[in-house]
Amino acid sequence: MSAQQALVAAGSRARPAPRRGALREALTGWAFSAPFLVIFLGFLALPILASFLLSFTNFSLGNLVDPFSARFIGLNNYAKLLHDPKFLQAALNTTIFVVFGTILNLAVGLAAAVALNRGITRFRAVFRVGYYLPVVSSIVAIAVIWRFLFNADFGVVNGVLSMVGIKGPDWLGNPTLAVGIIVALMVWRNFGNAMIIFLAGLQGIPNDLYEAARIDGANRWQEFRSITLPMLRPTMLFLTVLTTIGFLQVFEEPFVMTQGGPLNKTLPISMYVYQQGFNFFHQGYASAMAYTLFVVIAAITLIQFRLLRSET
Amino acid sequence: MSVAAPVRQASPAVAQTRPEPSSPGRRRSLGTWWVYVALSIGLVFLVGPFLWMVASSVKTSAELHHVPPTWIPQTFTLDNYATIFTKLSFPQYFINSVIVATVVVASNLLFCSMIGYALAKLRFRGKSAVFLIVLATIMVPQTVYLVPLFVLMSNLGFVNSYPGLILPFAAQAFGVFLMRQFIQGIPDELLEAARMDGAGEFTIFRRVVLPLLGAPLATLGILIFLGSWNNFLWPLIIATSDQMYTLPVAVATFSIGQNAVDYGLLMAGSVVLIAPVLLVFLLLQRFVQQGIATTGLKG
């Protein structure tokens, strides 16, 4: 909260009782909130709760017409998850995407932000806008472009390799390479976002600190290690939360580039939820899977916010 | 979101396009040439695929499959665009995307600023509960509610319809934060003065509050537009026939369907999908990046 906002907040607390009745103000408040709340509760809050209930039922295609005809089966769906090799594979894949993706996303985003903030003085806007282009572009279109670039037979990557006499691999047909390319695409598309948030954080670091360090004879690396990194800790934790949550839901990249293959090695949880819920119509089972993902996300968020709070 | 506070305070500086005069980098401008080189190489890798997309979309099929690839199209052709706009239903997909994005943006601008005003400036019982519920859902992944949302839509008869495509995105939580945040900054004295003059709350909202929200509404509108235009998973589920496809669903479906290797058509489709967004972004990028720094969320 800025100083101005704090003053405003203090002012409103000291404000005398409103001229018109409190009831009238309350009714107005609800009237202003109602349109948003009706849509929000009906199409977001209600489905979130319903998903929890669905996950304890055997809901499937036949129950679509009459949702209340589904049978309650306790924790069976959750028990089944633990013995579903495809789910376990998807969980492992998602972990790989998230861990490598998040680390690289923050590293590249930070490097770009530091370079833009202190490394150069001209053309900043050009680089900032250029690096940000993929963030606003449709991930579907980008994944189609990347699939074309990495096409084994006539993709530009193998075309360039063949010019120097190397026969390029079938990038998306090889499980390990396909995972690598999907992680690379996730970082390529998202690091501009991290960069912008890091830039905002960097500009909040007082210049005096750098001046003082310079007087003490610190070099650039020492400045980075002892000033920039510690001062960016809150920003970094915040970005870790955002990126982790985002990448846990990765869907489009594998959907367009590999459809989860080869051998389910690029199948993320969200895509398996989609398959179970909308291809096989096991809605109950899909909900259990989705809620498991949700609990993981909630736990990670809570832990990271707790860390953040103890920082600030 | 208290966590965003350090980010938020610095946000005006992000929007700045000219170099900061007090920047220490200026005094060290010698010896930074390699930073420019590294950043430029990065720029080639980031912008290159977009240029490749455009170049490929105007190549003939024979040239697309040529090894080694040609950098500049040898024979310029618009056949790919002609095909997607006449033989495939891209005009319909484009219109669908525009309709959905327009309604979603309009309803968020109106409803988020209304509830934002109530949460920021009016006192009523249950206000903090409302705010907490909205806050609690902001981090809930879409995957969690897709299945029951589809069940709900099919019982309402909204599968494969505009309401089905629009309603789940017509009231987005992060818009409430953004609007509440900005409306809190409006001095109470302004509103009190209007009340003294006998203005009702709706008049105050329309005549006093809304005119002060130009920049925040632009930011919110752009972020919601980007999100709606690029949205994929829900439209993929709810649009069950070709007639209701939005552009991302159409491109993705073609890319894994019968046109899977017709990269000329796919690149032309991708240009149609990406171009409007790049246009909006390049014209209004100040608002976009400001919005990111303010909310910490991407569009």
Image (tube, coloured by chain):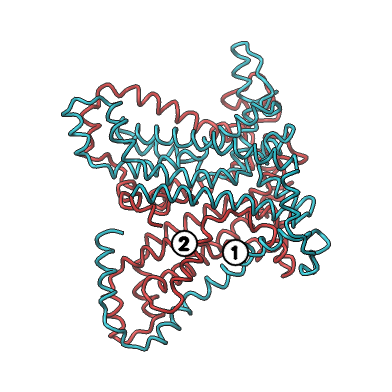
Report the amino acid beneath label 1: Leu
Q: In the picture, which chain is red?
A: B
**Disc 2 and disc 1 in contact, CB within 8 angstroms:** no
Residue ID at (42%, 44%): A237
Which percent across, then down, holds residue A289? Answer: 68, 51
Of residues A60 and A76, the one drawn nearer to the viewer in this rendering: A76
Residue ID at (30%, 46%): B16
Q: Which residue is mark 1?
A: A44
Q: Is residue A125 above or below residue B295?
A: above
Residue ID at (44%, 79%): B125
- Residue A178 as seen in the image, left or right of residue B101: right
Which percent across, then down, holds residue B144? Answer: 63, 55
Q: Is residue A171 visible?
A: yes
Report the amino acid beneath label 2: Gly
Q: Secondary structure at mark 1?
A: helix
Which percent across, then down, holds residue B299? Answer: 50, 51
**Between tags 2 and 1, which lies in front?**
1
